[in-house]
Amino acid sequence: MQAMRARKVDQGAARAMNRRLILDELRREGPLSRTRLAQQTGLSAASITIVSTDLLSEGLLIEHPELAPHLPRHPVPLGINYAGHHAIGMKLLETELQAVLTDLALNVVDQIHVPLRGPTPADAVDAARRASAHLTAPRHAARLIGAGVAMAGLIDTRRGVCIVSHRTDWHDVPFGALLRDALGVPVWIDNDANAFATAERLVGQARQASDFVVVTLGRGVGAALVLGGQVYRGLRGGAGELGHVLTERGGRPCECGLRGCLQAYISNGDLVAQFNEQQGEQTRQVEDLLALLAAGDDRPRAVLADAGRRLGEALANLTDLLDPELILIGGEGVIVGSALLDPMRAALQERHLPDAPPPEIITHRWSDDAWGRGAAGLVAEHFFEGASSHPDRTSEASS
């Protein structure tokens, strides 16, 4: 009996691994014929047939006969059924909740911004409930597989707990469980930079990379570290706090309570504050600095160049430690553009170890729905992982 049970578990584990290989290959490459899948994954033709038949019957894959005429001997390619499932992605800000409904390719189907009535977890749950009611109209509800939340702070993703967030002043809030009870669907929460990186790893500009860094600029400064194809979160979920590395001892105060943090020099609000302090002006947002530059006033350039240099030096340290394939820069702060990013690249080039070329730098074309799409990526990631392990669970239940 024990030998039979072991064989079932082994077969289930092998089937789960094969499913993951197939899903990952189709996610990275797009629709492929069964023959090409066998070549790419190293699986036998029989294994491809067995697993793909299961995935087709479960609605996880679909056939693309419209692509067959473009291939030799006209085999019918297989592709992931992205449109067959929906996810809600939410970004929690201080004053509002931004929410989107996406398919598994993180294409936005619908979106909404819901003002928060207050700063408490209950207010955030209420906003999420209202957003979900709007997004999950009857025609979408049956396809909904879960919700993801991206927020600033230290997040325990395993328990779904916000350990601390300086933006919301939350401490040890079981936000995942609160939302799951309110929405009635599985919920995953993570730091916003990690969520954004997850989406880029799945279907974005980093889907071909296994080791990369995402840096987010804007209201704060964050980073996500993807190592070996997985987001590295550290012991308590605190990995990637690039904004709080030291850039100047005894320097400007940071919202975390320390002084001299990188964020205190390059976040949007701190860029504006430094310019106002130096020039005696009353500008209110980073767009005002860009307007001055566009009008021929070069006074903001020194602050922006200094911020870019500090960021480049921090990225050089990160590059020397991790040796990533690429660095992806995102967030609302990318609007600053070349005035900050060119000095950043120059400092990175100057400071990284000279024995190897620096990683590729990609600037994300930011949009209002990018945070929400990142949060929906948390749902897609767990969906794909669950899909790949489904036979394993079945074998355990039946043994």
Image: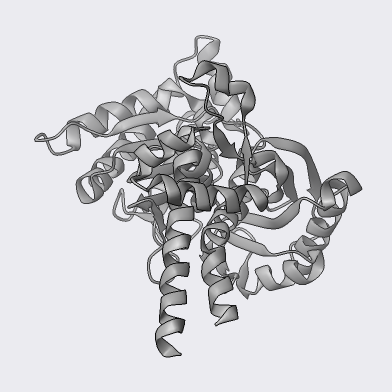
Viewer-side residue, 67 vs 355 = 67
The residue shown at (56%, 36%) is 78
**In this picture, is 309 found above or below 104?**
above
Q: Which of 72 and 274 is in front in this view?
A: 72
Q: Can residue 123 be seen at all in this image of the molecule? A: yes
Q: Is residue 231 left or right of residue 118?
A: left
Up the image or down, 335 lies above or below 104; here it is above
**How has the structure been colored for display?**
one colour
Looking at this view, is 114 or 75 the one in front?
A: 75
Q: Residue 14's image quarter? A: bottom left
- Identify whether 226 is placed above or below 8: above
Residue 106: quadrant of the picture: top right
> Residue farthest to the bottom?
1
Q: Position of residue 165 (x, y in %)?
A: 57, 63
Q: In which quarter of the image is the C terminus?
A: bottom right
Residue 252 visible:
no
Question: Residue 281: which quarter of the image?
Answer: top right
Q: Position of residue 124 (x, y in %)?
A: 76, 61
- Residue 384 location in percent, x, y? 55, 54
Instruction: Pick out the residue farthest to the top.
Output: 296
Give the x, y percent position of residue 222: 46, 49
Residue lying farthest left? 355
Q: Is residue 66 left or right of residue 242?
A: right
Residue plotted at (60% across, 30% down): 283
Residue 49 sits above or below residue 67 on the image: below
Q: Is residue 376 left or right of residue 259?
A: right
